[in-house]
Amino acid sequence: MRLGLVQLFKHRLAEGVLLVEEALRRGSRIVLLPEKWAAESEENTVTDASHPYLRALCELSSSYDSLIVSGALYERSREGRYITAYLCSNGNILGKARKMHLFQSEKKGFERGEEPFMVDHRGLRLGVAVCYDLDFPETVRLFALRGCDLLLVPAKIVHQAAEAWMVYVKARVLENRLPIAFANVCQPPYFRGGSAVVDLEVTGPEASPFAFPRVWAMGEAEGVGVFELEPEGYRDLRRKRLSDRNPRVDSLSMENQPQG
């Protein structure tokens, strides 16, 4: 599978379409954009599927027979305001993933998403989590338990936190034997890209292999990175890892949630 990561910051959503098309022209069959990569404005707020940016992505997904993750955008609906990633494929919107864990001041202006989002695409089960969602191990574990093959993460990581962020990503990959791809905003000096695919390097005996996180990263410039990966190759490793856990111990984390 060929995956395109787009790192950018624009004042208008329409300005990102050219980079999406570049990723598709370079053979990407899945394209991922960052979180909140366009300035917050009425024009850049999505209220329904008729938004011009989403229509453009749907047209590209049909023309190039691809799946495009819009990046996490500002959504306003009857239920409230959300930070939402839309998935476009074959000319249609397959669904949307709302950010489940809101970061700091986001809690004052947005509602939380309530459910991990996954979709089946060309024999793969793809999950979408938005930025801060990745910081919570229980959330990523839930994707793995539900059969996710590749977790796609629109992100907006300030450069001072980039090292810590990569620790989270590597840990989630290693914990679940689950490849993760993230696209980050490129808006120097504060947001410096570094979008990456993190999968696993597997060595040692077949009966008891060793697995190590492996990082394929972009640089700090605005643009497109295209990566070849085979997420289905980690299914057996993931089944083994998940079968080794004690579900009763895992469930204790849910039974002892703090109140309030």
Image: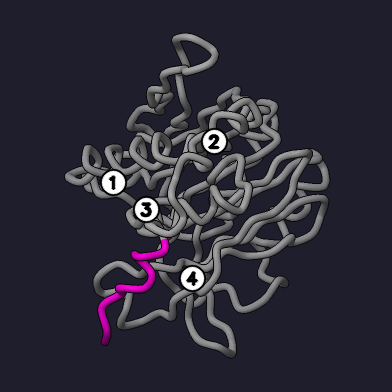
Whether 146 is drawn above or below 96: the answer is above
Question: Quadrant of residue 20 in the image?
Answer: top right
Residue type highlighted by circle 2: Arg
Residue type highlighted by circle 1: Phe
Within 10 Å of the Cα at label 2, are there few (<14), some (14-19), or many (20+) other Cα atoms? many
Counting from the top left corner in percent of width and height, residue 227 is at 56, 25
- State how far apart marks 3 and 2 are (Cα): 15 Å
Counting from the top left corner in percent of width and height, residue 259 is at 27, 84
- State how far apart marks 4 and 3 are (Cα): 25 Å
Q: Taking the image as drawn, is residue 180 in sight? A: no
Counting from the top left corner in percent of width and height, residue 92 is at 79, 59
Q: Which residues are magenta?
A: 251-260
Label 3 or label 2, whichever comes before in sequence order: 3
Quarter occupied by the N terminus: top right
Q: Circle 4 is placed at which residue position?
A: 74
Within 10 Å of the Cα at label 1, are there few (<14), some (14-19), or many (20+) other Cα atoms? many
Within 10 Å of the Cα at label 4, are there few (<14), some (14-19), or many (20+) other Cα atoms? many
Q: Which element type, helix, strand or loop, lies under badge 3?
A: helix
Q: Nearer the viewer, mark 1 or mark 3?
A: 3
Q: Nearer the viewer, mark 3 or mark 2?
A: 2
What's the mark number on residue 238?
2
Q: Circle 1 is placed at which residue position?
A: 191
Label 2 or label 1, whichever comes before in sequence order: 1
Q: Circle 3 is placed at which residue position?
A: 137
Q: Foreground residue, 221 or 125?
A: 125
What's the mark number on residue 139?
none
Q: Foreground residue, 245 or 128?
A: 245
Residue type highlighted by circle 3: Pro
